[in-house]
């Protein structure tokens, strides 16, 4: 079969296109999925580059959970159709249109934390076929979403759902989203607005209209100088922010933490603006604020997301689609950051 195979950590040259990669076979409790669409995430790029670091060694080459085994087929976002089932899996799954939960969990509980990811700890969807455990399938036969829209959901929207749930974002609250035009950022805007929160989106001025279309009540230009940004934020949220959903990290933590009202929450799931930060701890404990780390989603979070996909209540924005043969171009377009929405791969 055709597959994009990561041979080692490195640049684009480490990602090799193959048309003779072995077709995987489903074992007991597994299914073979013909991939209809996949999508590109920061996870794919950072895994290729080995950009996650290790405890005490932030410069070390590693995947998000530590050292990886190569070769590896990347791609955590998978929508497709079940073409074959392994022992113990009902044959009724054959032919079904499915969305695949990309996460591996610490235990069998609905609220177990994720400890691995398809395309990282096991082969993923940048191929014509992928083998997955049957218990991570969600039936999408009734969903009005396209294959590309479904494929946009697992990693970005799953991460966003986990952030909103862990930070307990509720109807009527005001939440600021950093990096709002990226995959997770846009998902945060859409999902937070869908649950009735008032969304303030931090983004570039050129992308403000797209964020307002996605559900943001107000946008703030990240290019603004600190004094102007503070003034604009005061006008947008005069009573302060109930929460910040942060996928950027870096200097934004120190700059925006004082904008949280008493008992506010800051939930973070990314560090594209910088992984090592300095801030005033007094602002945290004197105002009873909560700083929450959030890595992807739980089974319960993903089940709620799958239900939104079945009803069509949230519809991902697709910025561009590429054939698998153009995965290098897809990752370059993704890194250029000029788009709003998801970059998809069609095997």
Image (spheres, grey):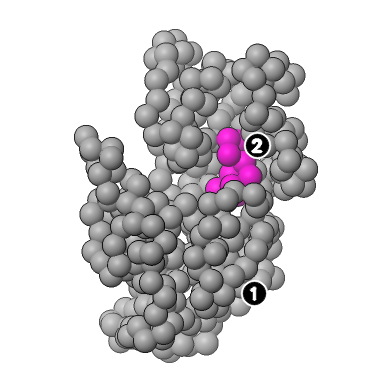
Q: Nearer the viewer, residue 173 or 100?
A: 100
Q: Position of residue 70 (x, y in %)?
A: 26, 66
Asked if the residues shown at circle 1 and circle 2 are in contact, with their CB atoms under 8 angstroms apart, the answer is: no
Picture residue at 25% right of the left edge, 59% below the top? 68
Per the rendered image, the range of residues in magenta is 177-187
Disc sitting over residue 142 in the figure: 1
> Can the viewer see residue 215?
no
Q: Is the residue 1 above or below the residue 224 in the image?
A: below
Q: Count up the numbered dots.
A: 2
Q: Is the residue 259 above or below the residue 212 in the image?
A: above
Q: Position of residue 144 (x, y in %)?
A: 69, 70
Picture residue at 39% right of the left edge, 20% below the top? 278
Classify residue 37 by image quadrant.
bottom right
Q: Is residue 184 magenta?
A: yes
**Mark 1: which secondary structure?**
loop
Q: Position of residue 333 (x, y in %)?
A: 58, 57
> Can the viewer see residue 288?
yes
Q: Is the residue 36 above or below the residue 77 in the image?
A: below
């Amino acid at each position: 079969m055709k597959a994009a195979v990561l041979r080692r950590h490195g640049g684009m040259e480490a990602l090799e296109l193959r048309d003779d990669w072995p077709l995987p076979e489903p074992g007991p409790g597994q299914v073979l999925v013909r991939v209809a669409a996949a999508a590109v995430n920061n996870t794919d790029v950072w895994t290729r580059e080995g950009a996650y670091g290790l405890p005490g060694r932030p410069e070390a080459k590693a995947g998000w959970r530590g050292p990886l085994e190569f070769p590896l087929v990347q791609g955590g976002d998978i929508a497709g159709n079940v073409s074959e089932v392994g022992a113990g899996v009902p044959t009724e799954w054959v032919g079904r249109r499915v969305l695949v939960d990309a996460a591996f969990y610490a235990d069998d509980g609905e609220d177990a934390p994720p400890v691995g990811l398809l395309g990282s700890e096991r082969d993923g969807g940048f191929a014509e076929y992928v083998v997955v455990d049957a218990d991570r399938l969600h039936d999408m036969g009734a969903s009005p979403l396209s294959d590309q829209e479904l494929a946009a959901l697992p990693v970005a929207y799953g991460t966003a759902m986990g952030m909103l749930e862990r930070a307990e974002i509720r109807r009527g609250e005001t939440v600021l989203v950093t990096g709002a035009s990226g995959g997770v950022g846009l998902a945060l805007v859409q999902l937070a607005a869908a649950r009735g929160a008032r969304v303030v989106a931090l983004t570039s001025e050129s992308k403000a209209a797209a964020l307002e279309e996605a559900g943001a009540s107000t946008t703030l230009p990240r290019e603004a100088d600190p004094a102007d940004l503070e003034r604009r934020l005061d006008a947008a949220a005069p009573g302060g922010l109930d929460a910040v959903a942060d996928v950027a990290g870096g200097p934004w933590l120190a700059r925006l933490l004082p904008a949280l009202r008493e008992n506010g929450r800051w939930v973070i799931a990314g560090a594209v603006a910088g992984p090592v930060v300095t801030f005033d701890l007094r602002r945290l404990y004197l105002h009873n604020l909560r700083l929450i780390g959030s890595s992807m989603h739980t089974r319960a979070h993903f089940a709620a997301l799958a239900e939104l996909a079945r009803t069509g209540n949230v519809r991902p924005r697709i910025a561009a689609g590429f054939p698998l043969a153009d995965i290098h171009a897809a990752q370059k377009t993704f890194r250029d950051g000029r788009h709003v929405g998801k970059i998809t791969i069609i095997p």
